[in-house]
Amino acid sequence: MVRWSPILLAATFVALASSCARHGGSYRPHSATAILVNGRASVPRGAPLAVKRAITAANRIQGMPYKWGGGHARPNDWGYDCSGATSYVLRNAGLIQGQMPSRGFLRYGRRGHGDWITVCARNGHVFLLIAGLRFDTQGTYRQDGPRWRPYPRSTRGYVLRHPVGL
């Protein structure tokens, strides 16, 4: 696996912040940002318990295959789609009960970026920004399952929401 240098991490963070600023408001993550180590996110020092649980849950399903409808009929599945993965992470963090389709996240929580967790939703797709990192089922060209993505994604056309209290 690739080890990220501090310079590359900072450049990735700046790109994500500027992308979010252009497409949906200013991105003001909490001062602590998670980093990727061997494909898994580390929990930043000082992160709230819900964020620690969200990162742990995302690490648990990170690398599983994409499965349309995965995570809906069975919350603990062998593969996940975008809303199944998002539901899994937020449910294990104690931030939702059950699961939702992607359009269900259009009204989740409160509007805008959260300090720690942001849900980026549109009808047909949803992904998470957790402690400055993107957790998404969609890669550059296709859906390839839930993974931490080290590169930013435009949020143009997405509704940005965050859990109450985070």
Image (cartoon, rainbow, N blue to C red):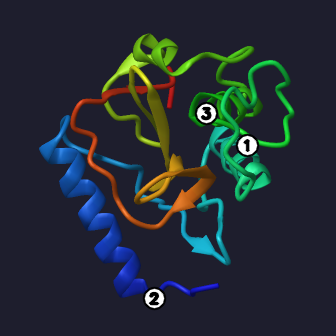
Q: Earlier in the sequence, mark 3 or mark 2?
A: 2
Is 61 on the left or on the right of 43, as rendered?
right
Above or below residue 123? Residue 36 is below
Q: Is residue 131 visible?
A: no
Which label was assigned to residue 135?
none
Q: How much space separates mark 3 and mark 2, taking CA atoms?
A: 28 Å
Residue at x 61% of width, y 61% of height: 45
Residue at x 85% of width, y 42% of height: 78
Q: What amino acid is at disc 3?
A: Thr
Q: What amino acid is at disc 1?
A: Arg
Q: Position of residue 12 (x, y in %)?
A: 34, 70
Q: Is residue 114 visible?
A: yes
Q: Earlier in the sequence, mark 1 or mark 3?
A: 1
Residue at x 37% of width, y 82% of height: 8
- Asked where in the image residue 51 lies, by quadrant, the reply is top right
Circle 2 residue: 5
Mark 2 packing: few (<14 Cα in 10 Å), some, or many (20+)?
few
> In the depicted view, which residue is nearer to us: 118 or 85?
85
